Image (spheres, rainbow, N blue to C red):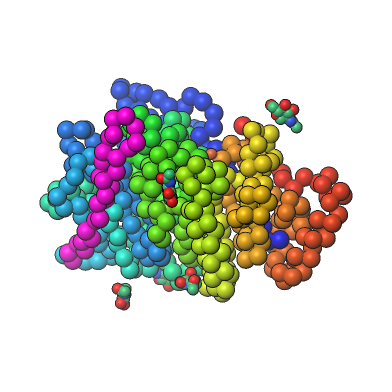
């Protein structure tokens, strides 16, 4: 099998790294040479029309950027303006009108806010852009900047993590340094579980979390998948606060980023069946069609990368996640309904990232629970049929291979 898995570790691990100095909240990095990260303040409620929680994501292509932000009140004219940094200074800003939706939290206070989404389409390859947002077209938020990937270059750089909270977000100073000083990433990929939890305190935890992310996510597209901590109110915070491509309200989508066909799915649909299973069937059929098409487009986008929150393989001993849970995702309900592994295998997904387990693990190529190979890049040397035969051979030698743990646990905690 081509399947290689990486499990992401919780990056907000150990305790006690948040500081308050002179009434101001800071996050301290685990790296001693990095400065403290001042947690951005939320705009005061006296200014309910002030933009906050500004963040970016890719639209249908890597040359389309969606700017998403929020205001407490309904606003008269939500706009984004943008201008290429190489443009002459007298060139006027381009304007993009935002589409606004009201979002009401499900908690007792029924806190409302307005989410605004502006699409900046058909941007120039490799260009840096200045942009800002406004609630009325006359008062503008301070100018921010992003860079569009250079489509004629075949490399992209991603930061990938999951399970990232509001409290003790030790990795933020490092991420900010990577994003601002080093300009390291074309995208950030957060594989589920945000804030712990966005709906808490009538949604205030979600607002503070998004504000905390703003210095990073307003500079680099922040791509997501949904995790179990977003479950409340049928995942309403996840649906409303992010703007992923496609038409599934952020649950399943794909986008090509340079040589990578990035596919994001909801593994949570398999576990929160109290919200119904129709969405699971829809996602499965979509995934089948999406992977089939992507697998025919390998010349243009050779890498198929899948993200989802709960893992298909892990080796921790924790309330059935790594046995029953992982098996359900792999082989589906009753061992056959909507199982993901046959699709992953059939279309040769190259790399998959999962979160949820707060430990770092990676596997050799595996299939049906068995180790197939000790070579990561075997698909370069073998065709799909040969690989298939190898995994079946491995399966028939189960007794022998079972003694080799396909998972390497590197750290735990
Ligand atoms: C972009 O923003 C920077 C900093 O705010 C400013 O110095 C520069 O003149 C702006 N460029 C354009 C083309 O707007
Ligand atoms: C996109 O921009 C390019 C120039 O950068 C232009 O040639 C092309 O027509 C534009 N396409 C659309 C759909 O606006
Ligand atoms: C994009 O990359 C190509 C090839 O490396 C280079 O020639 C071109 O100048 C780059 N474009 C920009 C806008 O940086
Ligand atoms: C929850 O949301 C899904 C779409 O993601 C929808 O199909 C389903 O009907 C909703 N369930 C309930 C109980 O509202
Ligand atoms: C194939 O990949 C290229 C490059 O990422 C992309 O522009 C194009 O839309 C893809 N085509 C299909 C049919 O997926
Ligand atoms: C897994 O955890 C359970 C409950 O904590 C414990 O009873 C069991 O012995 C553990 N199994 C292994 C293999 O460590
Ligand atoms: Fe989780």
- Ligand 3 sits in quadrant: bottom left
Residue 328 lies, in percent from the top left, at 64, 47
| Nearer to us in this view, 98 or 81 | 98
Q: Residue at x 40, y 39 (%)?
A: 233
Q: Residue at x 30, y 60 (%)?
A: 119
User: Is 104 inside the magenta-drawn segment?
Assistant: yes
Q: Quadrant of the C terminus?
A: top right
User: Is 283 inside the magenta-drawn segment?
Assistant: no
Q: Residue at x 28, y 30 (%)?
A: 109
Q: Residue at x 55, y 38 (%)?
A: 10
Q: In terms of image quadrants, where is residue 117?
A: bottom left
Q: Is residue 304 left or right of residue 410?
A: left
Q: Is residue 168 left or right of residue 361?
A: left
Magenta-colored span: 91-116
Residue 20 lies, in percent from the top left, at 36, 23
The relative height of residue 302 versus residue 244 in the rendered view (above or below) is below
Q: In terms of image quadrants, where is residue 73?
A: top left
Residue 223 lies, in percent from the top left, at 44, 52
Q: Quadrant of the N terminus?
A: bottom right
The answer to whether residue 215 of the structure is visible from this angle is no
The answer to whether residue 142 of the structure is visible from this angle is yes
């Amino acid at each position: 099998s081509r399947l290689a898995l990486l499990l992401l570790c919780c990056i907000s691990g150990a305790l006690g790294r948040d500081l308050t100095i002179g009434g101001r909240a800071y996050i301290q990095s685990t790296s001693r040479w990095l400065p403290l990260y001042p947690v951005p303040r939320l705009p005061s409620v006296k200014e309910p029309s002030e933009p906050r929680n500004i963040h970016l994501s890719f639209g249908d292509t890597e040359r389309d950027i969606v700017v998403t932000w929020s205001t407490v009140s309904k606003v008269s004219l939500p706009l984004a303006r943008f201008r290429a940094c190489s443009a002459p200074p007298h060139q006027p800003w381009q304007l993009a009108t935002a589409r606004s939706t009201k979002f009401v939290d499900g908690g007792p206070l029924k806190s409302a806010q307005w989410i605004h989404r502006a699409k900046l389409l058909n941007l120039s390859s490799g260009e840096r852009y200045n942009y800002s947002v406004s609630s009325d077209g006359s008062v503008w938020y301070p100018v921010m900047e992003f860079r569009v990937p250079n489509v004629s270059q075949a490399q992209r750089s991603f930061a990938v993590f999951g399970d990232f909270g509001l409290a003790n977000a030790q990795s933020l100073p490092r991420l900010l340094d990577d994003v601002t000083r080093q300009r390291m990433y074309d995208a950030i990929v957060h594989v589920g579980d945000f804030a712990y939890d966005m709906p808490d305190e009538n949604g205030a935890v979600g607002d503070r979390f998004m504000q905390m992310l703003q210095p990073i996510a307003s500079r680099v597209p922040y791509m997501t998948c949904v995790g179990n901590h977003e479950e409340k109110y049928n995942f309403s915070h996840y649906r409303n606060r992010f703007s992923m491509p496609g038409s599934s309200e952020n649950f399943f989508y794909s986008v090509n980023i340079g040589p990578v066909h990035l596919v994001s799915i909801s593994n949570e649909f398999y576990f929160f069946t109290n919200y119904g299973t129709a969405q699971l069937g829809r996602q499965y059929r979509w995934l089948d069609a999406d992977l089939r098409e992507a697998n025919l487009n390998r010349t243009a986008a050779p890498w198929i990368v899948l993200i989802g929150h709960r893992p298909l393989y892990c080796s921790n001993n924790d309330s059935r996640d790594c046995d029953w849970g992982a098996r359900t995702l792999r082989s589906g309900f009753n061992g056959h309904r909507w199982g993901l592994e046959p699709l992953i295998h059939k279309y040769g997904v190259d790399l998959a990232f999962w979160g949820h387990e707060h430990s770092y693990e990676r596997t050799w190529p595996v299939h049906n629970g068995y180790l197939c190979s000790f070579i990561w890049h075997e698909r370069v040397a073998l065709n799909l049929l040969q690989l298939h035969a190898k995994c079946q051979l491995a399966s028939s030698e189960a007794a022998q291979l079972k003694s080799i743990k396909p998972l390497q646990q590197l750290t735990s905690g």
